[in-house]
Image (tube, rainbow, N blue to C red):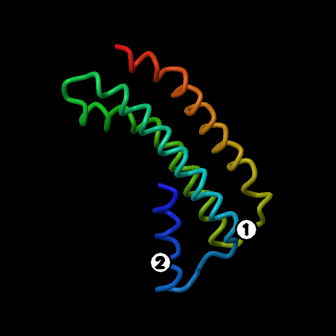
Amino acid sequence: MRVLGQMGFLAYALVLGNPVEDVLLFLLVILFGSMGLSFTMTMVSAIASKARNSHTLMAILSFPIVLPVLLVIIKISKNALNGVERSASLDDFIVLAAINALVGAASYLLFPYLWRS
């Protein structure tokens, strides 16, 4: 996801021009946002794989977990696009890192139990 996000950013920057004022913050958002989404989707897909209708269950289970990640990513990306100081995005960035740490730790702890059953 990180590679696709960076390739998409590079393609849009080359074709349409770079509207991002703070490129470093935007690249960090791509990195941490892709990590959060991949952690979340991996955990939810592992849980949903044990059910018969796993695609529907995955969509329903992932929505409340992905929504906060997306909202924080959008807010920090908007600040990076507008060139707002990095200190204004620091709290949101800490929230994103905390969500990533929580979901990553939960995935690490729960995945062996899901794998065995």
Q: Nearer the viewer, residue 75 or 94?
A: 94
- Which one is earlier in the sequence, the residue at label 2 or at label 1? 2
61 left or right of 77 in image: left
| Numbered circle sitting on residue 11 | 2
Measured as percent of width and height from the top left, residue 32 is found at 60, 50
Residue at image coords 63%, 65%: 26
101 left or right of 64 in image: right
Residue at image coords 66%, 43%: 97
Measured as percent of width and height from the top left, residue 42 is found at 42, 36
Residue at image coords 40%, 32%: 44
Q: Which of 20 and 88 is in front in this view?
A: 20
108 left or right of 76 in image: left
The number of callouts visible is 2
Toward which corner of the image does residue 43 lie, by quadrant? top left
Amino acid type at mark 2: Ala
Q: How far apart are marks 2 and 1 (CA)?
A: 24 Å
Callout 2 crowding tier (Cα within 10 Å): few <14, some 14–19, many ≥20: few
Please state which of the two labelled residues, at mark 2 or mark 1, is closer to the viewer: 2
Residue at image coords 52%, 71%: 9
Q: What element carries label 1?
A: loop
Callout 1 crowding tier (Cα within 10 Å): few <14, some 14–19, many ≥20: some
- Whether 98 is drawn above or below 71: the answer is above
- Whether 11 is drawn above or below 106: the answer is below
Measured as percent of width and height from the top left, residue 57 is found at 28, 31
Q: Is mark 2 on a helix, strand or loop?
A: helix
Task: Point out the image quarter for the C terminus.
Answer: top left
The residue beneath circle 1 is: 84
- Whether 109 is drawn above or below 38: the answer is above
Amino acid type at mark 1: Val
